[in-house]
Amino acid sequence: MRYVPALILDALFVLVFAVIGRASHEEDPGGFLITAWPFIVALLLGHLIAALLPARPRRPWSLGWGAVVWVVTVVGGMLLRIVSGETAQIAFIIVATLALGVFLVGWRAVAALLRRRAARSRDDRGPVERAATAESAVGADLDAGASAGAGAGADAPDPRAPIAGEPDPAVPAPERDADDAPDSEGPTR
């Protein structure tokens, strides 16, 4: 089922491609299915091939999956157009390749960028914020365990407490100023 959202989004982009193409040639945009059907069939084949490749990309929203779907959609769509009696002029092949590349790989590139930004923003939190988040998660787990009867007795040590003799991980280490750093010239006399 994880393939369905990517397949639906890709199919919508192929339909948009067909509508734009027909409108740009002042043809009836309502006949977009005539233009789109070879590409929709090839798109389905592209998703099937991407899913069955031995070293396949595992996620349908990945760039690798999108590249496989894009190539199969363009090549298969053009072949089906020719077999069905339609034309495949070089200009149409170029435009279709570029437009479908932007549509089928482009949304995946945007999704990858957004995922990276979200991961980076999680990593950009300071040590105090990360420790506070971890502490609240541990505290919630402990509270949940205690309320479920799985918690330890009242005399059990708090696992959130720092280990004796070691620095508290929730407190950031003091940062050294450049003025406090020893001179590289050696000790002063």
Image (tube, rainbow, N blue to C red):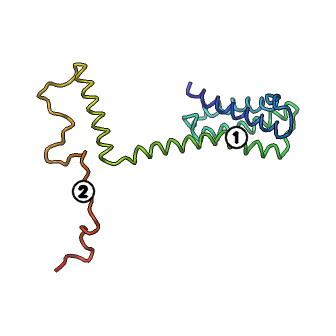
Choose the circle earlier in sequence order: 1 or 2: 1
Where residue 63 appears, as percent x and y from the top left, is 59, 42
Residue at 77% of width from left, 31% of height from top?
36
Q: Do the residues labelled 1 and 2 touch (CB within 8 Å)?
A: no
- For disc 2, the marked residue is 174
Q: With respect to residue 36, does 181 lie above or below? A: below
Disc on res. 60: none
View extreme (bottom): residue: 189
Q: Is residue 139 left or right of residue 79?
A: left
Q: Where does label 1 land, which residue?
A: 71
- In front of the other: 129 or 15: 129
Question: What crowding class fits label 2: few (fewer than 14 Cα within 10 Å), some (14-19), or many (20 or more)?
Answer: few
For disc 1, the neighbor class at 10 Å (few under 14, some 14 to 19, many from 20) is some
Quadrant (top left, top right, bottom left, bottom right) of the C terminus: bottom left
The vertical placement of 187 against 176, above or below, is below
- Name the residue at 74% across, 39% down: 74
Q: Distance between the residues labelled 1 and 2?
A: 54 Å
Q: Is mark 1 on a helix, strand or loop?
A: helix
Q: Which of marks 1 and 2 is in front?
A: 2
Residue sitting at x 25%, y 45%: 170
Outermost residue toward the left in this view: 155
User: Quadrant of residue 73 in the image?
Assistant: top right
Position of 118 compared to 40: left or right?
A: left
In the rendering, at what x and y percent does residue 163 appear? Answer: 17, 42
In which quadrant is the N terminus drawn? top right
- The type of residue carrying mark 2 is Pro
Please indicate whether residue 177 sits to the left or right of residue 77 in the image. Answer: left
Where is 129 relative to 143, above or below? Answer: below
Among the 4 quarters of the image, the one containing residue 149: top left
Image mark count:
2
Residue 85 vs residue 38: left or right? right
Q: Which amino acid does label 1 sit on?
A: Val
